[in-house]
Image (cartoon, rainbow, N blue to C red):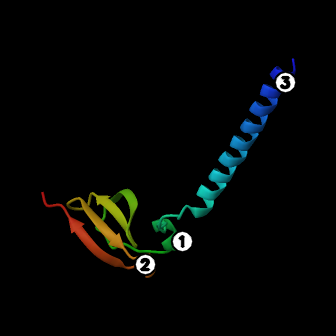
Amino acid sequence: MGDGMRAVKIAAVVMGVLILLGTAGLITALVLRKPGPTATPVAAALPATFDARLDEPDGSRILGVAAAGDRIAVALTGGGPDRVVLVDPRTGGVAGRISLRR
C-alpha cells in the first residue's frame, strides 16, 4: 500500500505544478497581449440632438435616416425624383444632395 500512495502523491504534486504553470501562462498571455486599435463609433462623434430644416417640395416623405461618416443621410421620396440629402449635424445645414433621375 505504500507504493500505491507514493504514486498518488507524485501524481498530485505533478498535477498541482501543471495547474500553477497553466495559470501563470494564462496571466502572462493576458498581460502581454497588445490591444488592437479601437475605432470610435460614428454615433459617439455625432451630437445627441440637432435641428435641421430641409426645404423640400410638398409631398416629400422621409424613407430612412442613417449615419454617413460625420453626416446624416436622409433618404427622401415624393415631391420630385427620389433623393438623398446629406445633413451636417453640427450646423443643421444641408451638406450635399444626391438625386436619382427618372
Query: Which mark sits nearer the N-terminus, 1 or 3?
Result: 3
Q: Position of residue 87 (x, y in %)?
A: 37, 73
68 vs 44, left or right, is left
Query: Which mark sits nearer the N-terminus, 1 or 2?
Result: 1
Which residue is nearer to you in this view: 34 or 94?
34
Label 2, residues with CA under 10 Å away: few <14, some 14-19, many ≥20? some
Q: Quadrant of the N terminus?
A: top right
Residue under the point 31% across and 60% down: 76
Q: What residue type is labelled 1?
A: Thr
Tell me where residue 68 sits by quadrant.
Answer: bottom left
Q: Residue 78 carries which label?
A: none
Q: In which quarter of the image is the C terminus?
A: bottom left
Q: Which mark is residue 49?
A: 1
Residue under the point 27% across and 57% down: 78
Residue under the point 84% across and 24% down: 5
Residue at the top extreme?
1
Disc 2 element: loop
Which is closer to the viewer, label 1 or label 3?
3
Q: What residue type is labelled 3?
A: Met
